[in-house]
Image: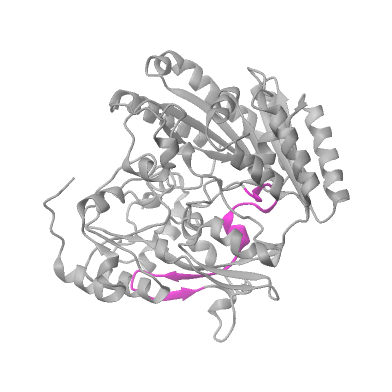
Amino acid sequence: MPDAFSPPADLAERLGAIVGAGHVSAEPAARASMAEDIYARGAVPDLVVAPGSTDELARVVAATTSAGRAVVPRGGGMSYTAGFVSDRPGAVLLDLRRMDRVIAVNPVDMTVTVEAGATWASLREALRPHGLRTPFWGPLSGLSSTIGGGLSQLNAFFGAGIWGTTSESVTCLAVVLADGTVLRTGSAGTEGSTPFYRHYGPDLAGLFMGDCGALGVKAEITFRLIPEPAHEDWASFAFPSLAATAAACTAAGRSGLASEVCGFDPGLARIRMRRASLLADAKTLAAVVTSQKNLLAGIKEGAKMALAGRGFIEDGDWTLHLIAEGSSRAEVEAKMADLRALMREAGGSEIENTIPKAMRAAPFTPLNNVLGPDGQRWVPIHGIVPHSHGAACLAQIDGLFARLKPRFEAKQILTGYLLTTLATNGFLIEPVFFWPDARYRLHETTVEPSYLARLPTHPPDPDGAALVAEARAGILDIFQTHGATHFQIGRTYRYAATRAAPTLALLQAIKRGLDPHGLMNPGVLGL
């Protein structure tokens, strides 16, 4: 950590005049902590700046790039692919969490506009009194993950089984470009109009979603709204094998019946059972009870969950968890009947629905899962493949894990899988790793203090970390053979390297046009 660092006073003063001196930090520890994500550390930025509005953000970006400094945007910090972990020294990191307002809820036009630093959890709370929701409504990390970060990286999970990823619920964006210009897309780009609709000519909003901040910094996001579904139900199934689970996941995804589909291998299911705030603790039970439509129904579901405890998954079983929602009880029951039939056809046997019930009752729980149950480091990697490739891709990754098993055991590396779906056409495979290694400051500021205090610490293990990196690279090779796509591209996934020549040429031309000096989060997307 460069304790003796002295940033350029003129730039710090200029930025302080825009956002207030208290929102510009050159303090070494603060800068170093902002150079970490869940998995990686990078070059420490020269300054950390926290703008409080779109106007302040635009002026900060203009002042920074005019000084020849790179701009690195950061939201909640939940990246694990170096999305904001730069290898370029001298950057100015934008901490966007002060820009956290829900600007406007419009129940008539069925839109909501938020600042980029708002969390998914805060958006959900703002919409709840109106009985409304965004179609996609957040990742599992929604307590800390920001909406701007979700659009830069893209997300899976809540609502994704029907509505797809984050960007598919967006109508319009306000984006700050490298020169400080504020660009408004869709209907918001029409003088005197409002951000009610995405499509008017070429879809400019799409350029800035999944870009990891390479093309601009998200400032304001408008989503379309839907009525909060009045009814939901949950079901869980056990399967004897990876192949059966993959087939069941594909069947559920293609059906378009489940708003969320979530599968675990036996090892990851056991690990999740051990983690705090997942199952039958008091907070989750209370959430299950209060989330039901009436107190009697809540007590009934809570009692079922408490009686099931944590012993309802047999050793060796893969599990798949499904959630259906709708405007009427009859609609939901019909969906669940069809889903149960599909699961039986795939060889599944129904088990207690504790996991999906808890997920829906308390969707955004404290992020204690950024460490393993014994204080291990944790990192996932993922790919999205077509349904026709899902089982084969999983089998190849499982083969890689089998070959590496003796080396994994020597370094106490545990692995697992999370499976989910995106609309009817995306099959997401997320292998995860746990290994004993020293944790970062980010882990210590993210995990609940009471939970962190119970976890052991581990010394640095560069050999174990190198083996995890080797395995992740091997998984990327497998994904590449299946034509996988990826969220959270950052500096990890091989985006630019795998683009066809015309595609890459267009992307580079857009980058040059919007960011001629290459100062917007340089290095992400492989640019």
Judged left or right of residue 9, residue 268 is right
Residue situated furthest left in the rendering: 4
Q: Nearer the viewer, residue 217 or 8?
A: 8
* Residue 180 in the figure: left or right of residue 236: left
**Residue 377 image offset from top left, x and y in percent:** 39, 32
Residue 163 colored in magenta in the image: yes
Seen at 26% across and 53% down, the residue is 30
- Residue 397 visible to the viewer: yes
Location of residue 383 with respect to 122 vertically, above or below: above
Looking at the image, residue 407 sits to the left or right of residue 4; the answer is: right
> Taking 3 as reference, is 143 left or right?
right
The part of the chain drawn in magenta is 158-184
The part of the image, by quadrant, that contains residue 120 is bottom right
Kindly identify the residue that appears in the image at 39 percent across and 59 percent down: 214
* Quadrant assignment for the N terminus: top left
Q: Residue at x 48, y 49 (%)?
A: 500
Q: How is the image coloured?
A: one colour
Q: Nearer the viewer, residue 373 or 527?
A: 373
